[in-house]
Image: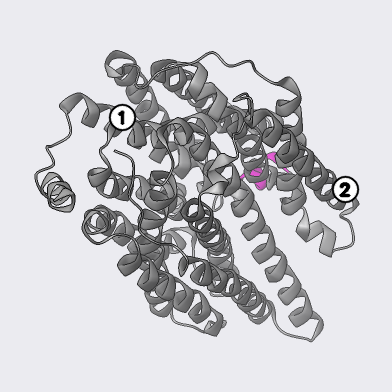
Amino acid sequence: METTTTTTTKQTSPALPREVVIVLAILVVSAMIMILNETILSVALPAIMEDFQVPETTAQWLTTGFMLTMAVVIPTTGYLLDRFSTKTIFVAALLFFSVGTLVAALAPTFAILLIARIIQATGTALVMPLLMTVTLTVVPSERRGSVMGIISIVISVAPALGPTVSGFILNSLTWHWLFWIMLPVVLLALVVGTLLIKNIGENKITPLDLLSVLLSVIAFGGLVYGFSSIGAILNGDGSLGIAAILIGAIGLAIFIRRQVQLGKQDRALMDLRPFRIRNFTFALVAILLAFGAMLGTVMVLPLYLQNSLGVTALVTGLVVMPGGLLQGLVAPFIGRIYDKVGPRPLLIPGAILLTAGAWSFSILNDSSPVGLVIALHIVFSIGMCLMMTPLMTTALGSLPRTLYGHGSAILNTLQQLAGAAGTAIMIAALSLGTLLATNAGSAQAEAVASGARTAFIAGAIIATIALVASLFVTRVEEES
């Protein structure tokens, strides 16, 4: 009798209230712009290097510094979401991002541009956990798949479209316009959100453990920096990177121990109790592996296209656009299907497609047609799309309401580590493969293609492990 009642409720689930739709729309647009910003500079780095006369290792800090800041700030968001109102966090996030974007657009030196990116990253770090926590709080469990499908566009499509947007803008404008074009959209979201967003959920006053904050900076900051230095480590000039990884690992072990102790008193900066829930843990592992493979691939593809196939920045953007657009179009429907059938009928085929696409990239060479690259990227993108919504909804939806904020903080923090690690592994493999081919007498285009194949194989191995983790994810009864 109870089963019948539940089914009827799901079939006749009312539409979301208008004010909830408005809040979610504002948060999704804001998050989309912010996450797009994370990878938008990948195609613009050569122009920035030329303008400021800095080497590639220095310019890369515009991406590394962004991820580093995210990794340092996000662990505190579980505490901040408990302590401050929805509107307060939203306004702070948008103000940080707006100021950072304006400073970046006006930046007269590389140092100021880097500072601007750090300010942007602070705002981005606040808005993603806020979006997920608000969604879990206000959306009934039977509708979460649909909403998470839209959020997955932010998580997986926005980074993939970064090079596309950048390529279009750089085709006729300078890199400064990457920021000028974003600014009015963000300011509009800030004004509308300030007027319409109200506090959602209840706040509680929990003492801030400063030692936990310090340990999180050492742990997550050290690991992200260390992973970002893998290329230098392989070149024999990475003693600082090795030290950062070791210190970060030690800091992480101490951080985990302290959070477990404080969690018993309900005082943890990042409550680790979500890891006790089987579905959260397996879904999280699959998310992190898939995200690492995706972000690494997004970084390697432009280098392969421009340095091996010899295409322009605009063509590079056009190559990855179909896959990104298809993800954006399909994601909401994936969410609706999830609400009806659960994760596995979507997740398993998605993981297979992602893995197949990742392995297929390894067949590319210096004479591969651009059409083939587009086709393989579409397969890869659809696989990612089929995975992200079921994984995110299952992971976060399996948590009790009291752990929503901390679960979101865990997911977003570890995503930064996964992104840094996936990018570092694949860029290092690209460099190593290119170097070996060059030493063997290959021409530049052929050597880069050889390096790209090595990188794509590394990404395919990561995707394969994600497929295995996906097999352990099951449907759960989510808390409404």
Residue name at image x 64 percent, y 35 percent: 69
Per the rendering, the mark at residue 26 is: 1
Of the numbered discs 1 and 2, the one sitting upstream in the chain is 1
Question: Which residues fall within the magenta stretch?
Answer: 48-53
Per the rendering, the mark at residue 114 is: none
Disc 1, SS: helix
Residue name at image x 89 percent, y 62 percent: 236
Residue name at image x 68 percent, y 34 percent: 259
Name the side, left or right, on which 98 lies relative to 429.
Answer: left
Q: Amino acid at mark 2?
A: Ala
Residue 443 locus on image (x, y percent)? 70, 82
- Our reading of the magenta stretch's main secondary structure is helix
Residue 326 locus on image (x, y percent)? 30, 61
Q: CA distance from mark 1 to mark 2?
A: 41 Å
Residue 340 locus on image (x, y percent)? 21, 58
How many numbered discs sit on the rendered protein? 2
Q: Is residue 297 magenta?
A: no
Q: Amino acid at mark 1?
A: Ile
Q: Say which of 232 and 312 sits in front.
A: 232
Residue 467 locus on image (x, y percent)? 49, 71
CB under 8 Å between callouts 1 and 2? no
Q: Is residue 84 above or below residue 77?
A: above
- Whether residue 388 appears in this view of the structure is yes
- Whether residue 171 appears in this view of the structure is no
Q: Say which of 225 and 208 sits in front.
A: 208
Q: Dot 2 corresponds to which residue? A: 243
Q: Is residue 234 above or below residue 438?
A: above
